[in-house]
Image: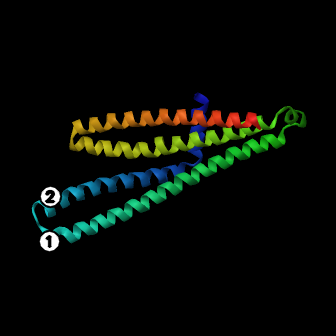
Amino acid sequence: MKKLFCILYDTVKQYRSRYCAAIIVSIIYSVVTVIYTALLQNFIDTVLVNRDFTQIVPIVLLFIGTAIITVISTVVRNVLIESINQNILYEKRKLFLDRLFGAKYQSIRQWNAGEMLDRYHKVSVYAEISDEFINEFIVELFSFLFITCYIFYLNPILAGIVFVGTIATSASQYFISKKTKRYATTKVSLEQSIA
């Protein structure tokens, strides 16, 4: 486990500027989401409840602005994260192939094709784990903390409910994805043993 964290730390350190950019974009996305919610509340109170239609044009323009910023920040964040993930996958596969081509002929002869494919597949699994770590922990953590702090400022009880619900949802997603990956690994192993 310690080795995994050291590898992930080295990866984060290597792409520090891209991670920082992704975190900043995520925080911008979170701020815009909070602003959108406040605008929606203002729209309901002003236009729908009080029937004051003089404020409808500025509120709609702000809705459009927040929608545009949300789309741009989502695209930028996804591009940053995907570029990091592709670089990680490329580096891990290149390292594997360099080791494979640098191995002695005697060692290569002892391996069968299924073992080599299994090792190559493990490189992809490692890159997927790095991908999940990047997406769900580093980037989303800052967005989650920002939104939770804002909700806590508005209503501490609501913040507690959101916090506990988010933790429970994240834990269930983690266990489901872990079981899914285990199934995928078993399937690949069976396919390799058949081949």
Which residue carries the number 2 mark? 45
Image quadrant where residue 160 sits: top left
Q: Amino acid at mark 2?
A: Asp
Q: Nearer the viewer, residue 117 or 138?
A: 117
**Is 69 left, or right, of 8 in this rendering?**
left
Which residue carries the number 1 mark? 54
Image quadrant where residue 12 sits: top right
Residue drawn at 25 percent across, 67 percent down: 60
Residue drawn at 32 percent across, 54 percent down: 33
Would you say residue 43 is visible in this rendering? yes
Q: Quadrant of the C terminus?
A: top right
**Dot label at residue 8:** none
Q: With respect to residue 179, does 137 lie above or below?
A: below
Q: Nearer the viewer, residue 161 or 147?
A: 161
At numbered mark 2, what does the secondary structure look like: helix, strand or loop?
Answer: helix
Residue drawn at 64 percent across, 36 percent down: 187
Q: Nearer the viewer, residue 17 or 91?
A: 91
Residue drawn at 68 percent across, 40 percent down: 121
